[in-house]
Every structure is written in structure tokens, then in C-alpha cells.
Amino acid sequence: MIAIQIKKTLDSPAGPMVLDLDLELKKNQIIAFYGASGTGKTSALRILAGLLQPDKGSIQVEGQVWFQSNPKVFSLRPQERNIGFVFQDYALFPNMTVLENLEFAASQGKNVNLDHLLELTELGDLAHKKPKTLSGGQQQRVARARALAQRPKILLLDEPLSALDESIRRKLQFCVLEAHKEYQLTTILVSHNKEEIIKLSDWAIQLKEGKVVQQGAPINLFSSKKIPEKFKVSGEILDFTQKDNVVEVQLLVQDHVFKMEIEQKKADSLRVGDQIVLASNDFRPKLYKK
Amino acid sequence: MIWDTLLLTLQLALVTTFFLLLVSIPLASWLAQSKSKVKPIVETLVSMPLVLPPTVIGFYFLVAFSPGNAFGNWLNEWFGIKLVFSFPGLVLASILYSLPFMVHPIQSGLAAVSPSLKEAAYLMGKSKRETLVKVLLPNIRPALLTGMVLSFAHTIGEFGVVLMIGGNIPGVTKVASIAIYDEVEALNYQAANQYAAVLFVATFCILFLVYLINGRYFKTFWK
């Protein structure tokens, strides 16, 4: 278990902000931090990794003290925390090939099967290429493989899939789950994509201005309790077309675009780009394989 | 005679560049990441040779290390080290004089490397030293090359400092720039021209090579 009780004053665009965390995170779970930009999500990861020192508080991991400010300030060096960290910019070493990046991370006397890791992350063909020559998705895979090569107990992912397009993102989400199970990790990720959080995480924590505003199983956090209908999907309004007495609205749900008619009065309260929920009790869908 | 002097100049430039590299890497690395209050003082001291007349450095060096003074005398008596009018003295003064030319490019190079590279290496359990040698320095090769070549070329071109400390002892401290001055004073323009032409061509070639390499004209070399 990871017990974090810390306070840290951060500089945010709106002025100084206190990151105030009091959390107990369970072992072998995937935990997601979410919230608007500048709420301290990345700082929370950096504090856990030892790259940023809290002003006060304590961090204990499996009973071992990683940080404490009382009675004397003690901070375990990042080198001794055995944390795998996938940075937002991936932080691949440009002077090394893919394989050398992995070897550098693994060279600590640990018996790591790099061939298996390359296979798991589908990087076998790219082993001798330099990171600069790879696409964004490939670089993300190298960064994750490199983090796993050091056999960490905790894997931290800072917006791991935000820069990638939808199809690659889906595939990599599956890979994150697979590696999490195989390497028996405690994975903590930062994301602002609700779909990703629901798919991946066991526990989600929402931060607002440095404070935890709610936490729980994502399915409970994101289900709209105010809408009574049983069947709900979220989407976005793309366009409106005026038709006699009604308005035809074009919607994007997942990656499907379709049209539906709504009353003029309802349309007046909506704008293009609004996030909406489609709800129905009359749920009789047909199922197609993609 | 001309070749002895040029060889001595080359020797001084090479030895100075080598020791400068050893000194400047830790110093530039500290300057690139330090938030210490003494950092502006150190930065000022490192940059001073850029604006200070070389004779000022030479003068204080001469005063400090002259066997006629306490410190110079102590060095001479206890360690047998005589820095004034000697080759080691020239090297030491050249290191001080060319320090900004090596430190500045390395410092800028290190500051431009994404901090996440260093952090990633630390999280892999790597020490600061291993991170510097295996991750940071290989990624600032153009900055290292620039620093080495500028220091080398600047040492070849120095005049005031070497004249003050080294004097004009053939085969020991008489470098090319001093030889040119010497020959002109003796109205021996042909010999002066030989030295000057060699320095002119050599300096052009060195700097041209740096611009070629750092301008990525030799792509395969840096790949």
C-alpha cells in the first residue's frame, strides 16, 4: 500500500497553489489522477518519484518511509525508489538505439528478458533504430518497455497516450493493461480522458486546485446519477440544421456520427461543441463486430 | 626555428584544451543546474577573461607566482614548482584565459537538454556521474566540439597573457603570436609573414570544420 500525506506549494498560472494530498493507494491496482490542467496531477507523480520534494508530510510505500518532514527531513533518493516513469515527452535517450535504451534501464544486475519485452511491446523490428526515427506511437512503446525493463514495483504514466491518435491509443490501452498484469505492477497514471480512465483504472482520483475532490471506482464516479434512464452514452454536438418546427442535430458518439431531431426549445439551450448524454430506457440495440 | 615555435604553440593549445575539458565539464554541469546564491559570482568570474585585458590576468598571475613573493616562493621551495617563465605556467594561465570559451558552450548545451532525460536516468538508479557521462555528454557533442575548438583556437591566438607570464624564451615559452611581434620589431617581415600565414590558414581551417560539423554537413558522422 502507498500512503501519501503531503503538502507542497506550487506555482500555477493563477498564482501559488497548495497541493494537499491525503491518499491511500492499494497495491496492484491501476489508479488514475484526473482533473483540469494545472491542478497538480503531474506534480503528484513527481513527488511520488522523488523528483519533487514536498514541503511537509510523509510518504510510505509498503511500510518503507520514502519521505518524511518530521522529526527530521528525510527523502529517499529517486535512484532507490525503483519506479518506472513514462514521461509526457517520453525522455528517450537520443544517443542510444531502442535496444540500448532498454539495456541501460535494465543494467542493474536484474535478470530481465529484453527479447520478451521487445516482443510484448512489438518493438522487435525497431530494436536497432534511434528514437528520433520513430513515430509517436512507437516512441511511447519504447518509453513503456524501457520503464518495464528496470522491473519496477510502481509504474507512473504521465498522460501516456494523449499525443496519439484514436486507433493507436486503443491498442496501447490494451498493452498497458497486459503489462500491468504480467509484471504485477501498481500503475498510477495521469489522464484527462474519461473513456481511458474507465477502460484502464480500478480507482480514479479527481484533483481540483491541488485538492482531492472525489475518488472512487471510475464507473461510479462518471455515471450520471441525475439521469434516471438505464442506458446512457456520452457524445458531442457537431452541428445544427433548422427544419420546419424541429432542429436536426448532428452528434458524435465514440467514433460514430449520426443525426437526430430535437425540439426548438431544447436546441436553444445547446451549442456546437457541447458534451451531451444520450439516455434511453428503450434499449434494444443490434450488435455488429467492428 | 619557425617549426619549433609552431610546435610549441600547438603543444600549448592541445594541453590547455585537454585540461580545460576536464575542468569545464564539472563546472559547466554545476552552473547549468545550480540554483545556488554563489552561482552569479562564479559565472562572473568565468566570464571575466572575455572582457578583461589579457595583460591584467598576466600581471596578477606574475605577481602571485613570482618566486620573489610569498606564494610563488612557497610553491618553488616546497614543491619545486616554478610557474613564471615556464611551460606549466603558460598552460595554467591559458586555462584561466580560455575558460569561458569552453564553459559557455558546454553550459548552454547542458541547459538545453530536456530535464526529463536526466530524471529518467536517475529513476533507473543511475548516479549523477553516470548520467552525465552516458546520457548528457553524448547528447551535447556539438557543444563539446565547439568548446574544444574555440578554446584551442583562442589559446593559439593569445598574446598578452603569455607575454607577461612566459616572456620570450625560445623553445620554452616563445609561441607563434609572440614570435610574430618579435620578428616585426626586428623588421624581419618575411619571418613574421610565415608565422602569420600559418596561423591564419590554421585558424580558418579549424573554424570552418566546426561550422561544417555543427551545421550537420557531415550527417553520417553525427548520426
Image: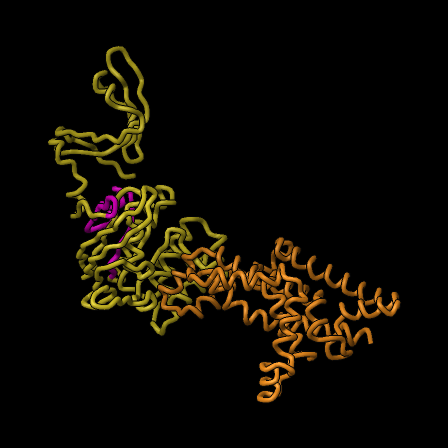
Q: Is residue A236 above or below residue A268?
A: below
Position of A207 with respect to B129 (left or right) is: left
Position of B75 with respect to A180 (left or right) is: right
Q: Is residue A116 above or below residue B14?
A: above
Position of A132 with respect to A54 (left or right) is: right
Q: Is residue A248 above or below residue A49?
A: above
Q: Check the picture and name the quadrant holding the C terminus of chain B.
A: bottom right
Render colour scheme: by chain
Q: Residue A15: in sight, yes or no? A: yes
As drawn, the residue found furthest toward the left would be A228
Chain B in the picture: what colour?
A: orange
Residue A200 among magenta residues: yes
Q: Nearer the viewer, residue A43 or B2?
A: B2
Measured as percent of width and height from the top left, residue A208 is found at 24, 44
**Numbered marks: total:** 0
Q: Quadrant of residue A86?
A: bottom left
Q: Quadrant of residue B128?
A: bottom left
Measured as percent of width and height from the top left, residue B22 is found at 55, 72
Write down which chain is painted yellow: A
As drawn, the residue found furthest toward the front would be B69
Q: Residue B141: in sight, yes or no? A: no
Q: Which residues are magenta?
A: A185-210
Measured as percent of width and height from the top left, residue A129 is found at 49, 58
Q: Residue at x 63, y 61 (%)?
A: B52
Measured as percent of width and height from the top left, residue A205 is found at 21, 48
Q: Nearer the viewer, residue B204 or A145?
A: B204
